[in-house]
């Protein structure tokens, strides 16, 4: 199942309705499992996901409590703060103590041609068993517990380094979770699930956005992201390779 979210502008809120204020309380993401209409100010609409990093604050159990969120306040309940805190915890606590040695972070935004999207999602759910071994869940009374997947229609870009079919419709598939089980043995070093998703993306003619962990070989990477065009620019503006190459920065950092 799924939930379709639509938005439109209104000059005035109906007299029998109130403006909803999401943020430190109530949280926005639990509301998406319920049908209905909310009225938000434009600023609140644009930032509605940020106080819970979409739904990823589930990895911080205390943030489900009203009092904790009130004590934190809006200056802490922000995605950039969560990421900084999470990075510090991984670098200075989890990795030194090897507490996450078999945990794999699956943080992906992938563009799939709309004709291939249905099958990709089926394959995705097979390869990435988040409902079973992940930390992020959405629960609706009377229905099985599910792992949320973000679906958003986008048009293919004409950017030479993100080669897609320009103007054609793709589905952006967003997924953010931490998984741990036999499927993730070896953790991020092995990247078993991430690697499998990269292979599925190539098979379905999609493109993975490059803001998270990537496991392509150098040959695969430049084949998928128009390495020939990149190397022309690199040779022109950095012929002595004073700066690290694109592949090294994105796949070896």
Image (tube, rainbow, N blue to C red):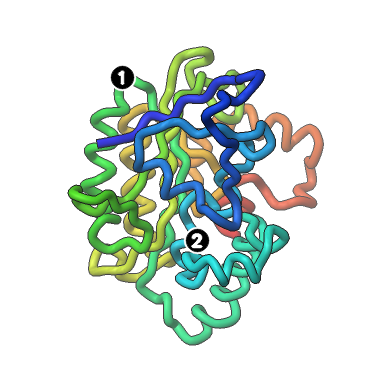
Q: Residue furthest front?
A: 16
Nearer to the camera, 90 or 143: 143
For disc 1, the neighbor class at 10 Å (few under 14, some 14 to 19, many from 20) is few
Q: In terms of image quadrants, where is residue 105? A: bottom left
Residue 28 left/right relative to 81:
left
Tell me the residue at 23%/60% (across/down): 132
Q: Nearer the viewer, mark 1 or mark 2?
A: 2
Tell me the residue at 24%/51% (across/down): 141
Residue 59 point in image, percent of width and height: 45, 66
Q: Which corner quadrant holds the N terminus?
A: top left
Vertical order, 35 against 137 (above or below): above
Label 2: element kind? helix
Tell me the residue at 68%/63% (across/down): 73
The residue wearing badge 1 is 115
Q: Which corner quadrant holds the C terminus?
A: bottom right
Residue 185 left/right relative to 66:
left
The residue wearing badge 2 is 57
The disc, 1 or 2, on the residue closer to the chain's N-terminal end is: 2
Nearer to the camera, 236 or 194: 194
């Amino acid at each position: 199942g799924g939930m379709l979210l639509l938005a439109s502008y209104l000059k005035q809120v109906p007299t029998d309705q109130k403006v909803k204020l999401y943020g430190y309380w109530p949280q926005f993401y639990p509301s998406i499992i319920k049908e209905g209409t909310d009225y938000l100010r434009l600023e609140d609409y644009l930032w509605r996901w940020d106080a819970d990093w979409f739904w990823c604050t589930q990895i911080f159990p205390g943030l489900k409590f009203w009092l904790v969120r009130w004590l934190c306040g809006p200056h802490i309940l922000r995605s950039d703060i969560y990421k900084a805190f999470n990075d510090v915890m991984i670098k200075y606590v989890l990795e030194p103590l090897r507490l996450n040695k078999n945990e794999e972070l699956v943080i992906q935004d992938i563009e799939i041609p709309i004709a291939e999207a249905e099958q990709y999602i089926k394959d995705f759910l097979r390869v990435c068993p988040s409902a079973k071994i992940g930390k992020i869940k959405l629960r609706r009374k009377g229905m099985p517990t599910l792992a949320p997947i973000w679906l958003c229609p986008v048009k293919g870009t004409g950017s030479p380094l993100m080669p897609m079919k320009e103007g054609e419709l793709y589905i952006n598939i967003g997924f953010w979770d931490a998984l741990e089980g036999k499927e993730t043995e070896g953790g991020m070093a092995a990247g078993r699930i991430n690697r499998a998703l990269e292979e599925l993306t190539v098979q379905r003619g999609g493109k993975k956005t490059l803001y998270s962990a990537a496991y392509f070989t150098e040959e695969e990477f430049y084949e998928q992201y128009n390495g020939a065009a990149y190397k022309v620019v690199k040779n022109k503006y950095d012929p002595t390779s004073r700066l690290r190459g694109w592949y090294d920065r994105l796949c070896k950092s």
